[in-house]
Amino acid sequence: MRLENSFIPARGVGEKTERTLWQQGVTHWDEFEDGLLGPKTSENVRTFIADARDHLDDPDASFFADFLPSGSLWRAYDNFAADACFFDIETTGLDSGRHEVTTVSLHRAGDTRTYVQGEDLTAERLREEFAESSMLVSFNGKRFDQPFLEDNFDLDVTTPHLDLLYLCKQVGLSGGLKAVESDLGIERDDEDVDGREAVRLWHRYDREEDDAALDRLVRYNREDAENLRTLLETVHGRLRSDVFEPHV
């Protein structure tokens, strides 16, 4: 499902009105005509479509993040997938005031980069990565990863952020990332590493200069980020089937 299928960002259009338009065969902005809705609402739709086309050409995902209802940013993914950044962090604990970020992995346009504390993990690198991304995709990143990075690196992250934790709940998938991956049959190369082991691996590297421990931690962190793409595409397909396809 693409943004061009969506009318709910327009003022005065709710999900019920949008479904009515779809059922009438109006499934794309190009198909909208005056008279389908009341005069004021029709004007709002026409204004939104004109503005939205400009922001698709820019491209500017922030415009749609501001106008889409909460929980609907997934509709923008197909339009901005080329520069979407799937990211995940590892830390020494859960409190951003007392603990540190150890590694950050970012997967974008088929390429994965991992930044490591004490080597190349800096605020400037993160600012550059986020500035180059159309949107961010995480799992529980709105509550954990993003605030943790903002606290540790004095960042103000404004890139639109799609959190798969909440998206998964919309299609009946619950639990942590590994549990959801297991439910969907998404496999990992090393099933024995989890969050606690990631902390132990970092301490082995940091205190004992165990390069093998760092390598294993980096592989785990990279797989977290890369698997988010598979997860989003799976959930996106389910949402499209639930939200859009029954009405067209």
Image (tube, rainbow, N blue to C red):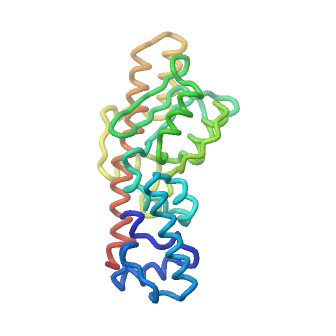
Residue sticking out furthest to the right: 97
Locate the C terminus and report the quarter of the image it occupies: bottom left
Where 147 sits versus 247, above or below?
above
Where 165 sits versus 216, above or below?
below
Residue 3 percent location from the top left of the image: 42, 64
Residue sticking out furthest to the top: 208
The image quarter containing residue 242 is bottom left
Residue 8 percent location from the top left of the image: 50, 72
- Depth check: 218 or 112 in front? 112
Where 210 sits versus 24, above or below?
above
User: In the shown orientation, is residue 22 left or right of residue 64?
Assistant: left
Q: Is residue 98 something one can see in this rendering?
A: yes
- Depth check: 208 or 138 in front? 138
Residue 113 percent location from the top left of the image: 41, 29
- Depth check: 148 or 45 in front? 45
Residue 108 percent location from the top left of the image: 39, 39
Q: Residue at x 44, y 87 (%)?
A: 36
Locate the N terminus and report the quarter of the image it occupies: bottom left
Q: Which residue is drawn at 43% across and 19% down?
A: 213
